[in-house]
Image (spheres, grey):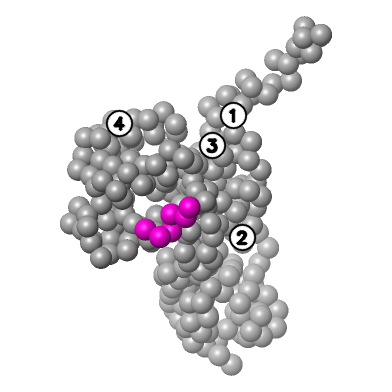
Amino acid sequence: MESIHLAVKDFLHDCRRRVSPNTLSYYDSALRAFTEHCQTHGIEHVEDLTRRSVRQYAESLDGILSPGGAHARLRALRVFIKWAMREELLATSPLPHALMPKVPQPELEVVTPTEMQALLTASKGRRMPLRNKAILLTLFDTGLRASELCGLQIKDLLPDSTLYVRLGKGAKDRRVPVSKPTRRAIQAYVDKERPRTDRTTLFLSQTGGPLTTSGLRQLLEHLCEDAGIPIKTPHAFRRGFAVSFVKHGADLVRLRDALGHTTVTMSTRYAVMSTEDLKELHREASPVMHLGRKGRED
């Protein structure tokens, strides 16, 4: 009989090879709370878990966490229990039906083309304007994660107009196409503004060190304030890329490959369009708007 504490420890150790540090930290935090709950209620071993005990844990989250927070805690628990089943620590699944709470689905934050124009204008007024422009275009043109953009090396801008993204989420390398304007912006930054240094990281901070994800977020906050638009996270650029990519004809398989996802389902979540996006597409694709066009052309 293995204790829940040791099983969670083994699970996290196994995950180190397969998930990003952020995901590992999320699993650790969520399962620590679950372990503490089990200790409080006298549940010591993995095989002591039952549908009733798991349901009671889920119910204990009501009123303490938002539906989204409870959903996140229970997602981590679900992954852990499925792992325990594969490891034969559990003979049957203790996951009850309808475990996950319903979570309202708000429109996801995205960067729009209009906001991008405002940001590009604002980027000229801050230090290292060529770097700022290159970063903005790279984020919006490729949908890179913050960690992926900060991890780019100078040599990763390839001659065939792609970026080589090293060890993305899930430790998967991939090549991402970049447009000519983005490539020119990156090259202009490297040739004219990037500090002369032995560092190989592509984007550097104002002090000459590698740009960090926290530094990137701070830069975007300042640019958004200068542009007079709501604060946008790096993920908002990623979602903005996804929406625009699909609006302009790309299918979900190509979007999956560009974003570095393992499934189309995950990519679909990023490509959720706002009401205004749908209205624009409807104006272009409405069957009623196309009635009679063929006849007039004939």
Label disc, if present, on residue 278 of the rendered structure:
1
How far is disc 3 from disc 1 in space, using C-alphas? 12 Å
Outermost residue toward the bottom?
A: 1
Circle 3 residue: 244
The stretch in magenta equals 154-159
Q: Amino acid at mark 3?
A: Ser
Badge 4 or badge 2: first in the primary sequence: 4
Q: Residues within 10 Å of mark 1 (few under 14, many from 20)?
A: few
Residue 286 position, x and y percent, is 69, 21
Magenta segment includes 199: no
Residue 282: x percent and y percent? 64, 24
Q: Residues within 10 Å of mark 4 (few under 14, many from 20)?
A: some
User: What's the CA distance linking mark 3 and mark 2?
Assistant: 20 Å
For label 2, the SS is loop
Residue, x 59% and y 29% (percent of image)? 278
Q: Residue 43 appears at what percent x and percent y?
A: 52, 82
Q: Position of residue 74 (x, y in %)?
A: 54, 64
Q: Nearer the viewer, mark 3 or mark 1?
A: 3
Question: Label 4, label 2: how many angstroms apart (C-alpha)?
Answer: 36 Å
Query: Which of 11/281 is in front?
Result: 281
The answer to whether mark 3 and mark 2 are in CB contact below 8 A is no
Sort mark 2 into few (<14), some (14-19) or many (20+) by Cα contacts within 10 Å.
Answer: few
